[in-house]
Image (spheres, helix red, strand yellow):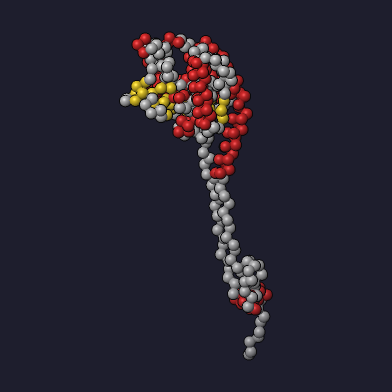
Amino acid sequence: MSARFRPLPLLATFVLTALLGACASGGTTPAPEAIAPKPVPAPVKPVRIGIALGGGAAKGFAHIGVIKMLEANGITPDVVSGTSAGSVVGALYASGMDAFQMQKTAFGLDEAQIRDVSLFSGGVVKGQKLQDYVNQLVANRPIERMKKPFAAVATQLETGERTVFVRGNTGQAVRASSSIPGVFEPVTIGPKHYVDGGVVSPVPVDAARQLGADFVIAIDISTKASGKNPGSLLGTVNQSITIMGQKLGQQELARANIVIRPQVHDIGPADFEQRNDAILEGERATLAAMPQIRAQLAKLRAERIAAAQPREPVKAPEPCKPGRLGGLFGNKCDGNSGKD
């Protein structure tokens, strides 16, 4: 008895047709694509703020007002550099005092605490009292043990080189930085002698950079030329020195991000009784500069955030795929990747 032909079920016919079509076209089942992990943003480096406190004798009380207003507006410097009077305030601030503690200390200051006139050296101030006074206020901490990185800038008398003290006796470094020629005796440290840092660095912006600051707020309280003919030999010499310091300071101030200039020009170098006026002028000048400080800090932070964002990986072009009937009719890739 002959076998009867039974048609294949419809499902089997469809599967067989599909397999034959795949073989005829030479196609293969595409491999599953791996999903690339999303790139992780790099950590954003915080902005390291430095404050550079310039020299100016009794005008230096203005630095206290500047620091007070910075802190009141949520801006706390990470590093501190100081020249002359700026080194005194800078040392106290770096030791851990806040602006109100420094103001209280300033109001309680008696000039006799820091003035020790030497009759054997032409009536100039020795500076030992200033050294002892500063060391007492900072609890005898050496510079390297301050709560904030601190640098006091002085001038080496033998060579005229700028010297940045970042280690050692804090009071002695401040004394060296504050030794105004003709007013203080030069300070002997080892085989060298040092005088006021304002001779080479009136506002120590570069020292703040050396401490690692990448945003420097400079406070310039230096004396400016009067705009008048002094009319005397001594006045001419003093104004000439002022002009020299002014020109020297401009070069370094150009490397600061922000320059604050309290209006303390009417305060003389020995006018300690005007300390309150100097502090108020520091506050006023800082408040006026706050919009600029905020804007520049925000810009720098935004640039760092943008730089830390991961870049999207560039996708490689897809491999060329032949058409479904390419194997039957000889169609090859025609340059249109992935298209039939």
Relative placement, left or right, of 248 versus 25 is: left
- Residue 45 in view, yes or no: yes
Q: Is residue 245 above or below residue 270?
A: below
Q: Quarter of the image for the N terminus: give it.
A: bottom right
Report the number of discs: 0
Q: Residue 297, position in %: x, y? A: 58, 33
* Residue at the image position 55 percent from the left and 21 percent from the top: 224
List the single residue furthest toward the bottom: 1
Q: Quarter of the image for the C terminus: give it.
A: bottom right
In the image, 324 versus 69, the foreground residue is 69
Relative placement, left or right, of 336 versus 53 is: right
Q: Is residue 4 above or below residue 227?
A: below
In the image, 6 versus 72, the foreground residue is 72
* Residue at the image position 58 percent from the left and 18 percent from the top: 228
Q: Residue 62, position in %: x, y? A: 54, 19
Q: Residue 197, position in %: x, y? A: 44, 24
List the single residue furthest toward the left: 191
* Residue at the image position 59 percent from the left and 33 percent from the top: 296
- Residue 76 in view, yes or no: no
Q: Residue 215, position in %: x, y? A: 53, 33
Q: Is residue 291 above or below residue 64?
A: below
* Residue at the image position 52 percent from the left and 44 percent from the top: 42
Task: Give the quarter of the image for residue 15.
Answer: bottom right
Q: Is residue 125 above or below residue 21?
A: above
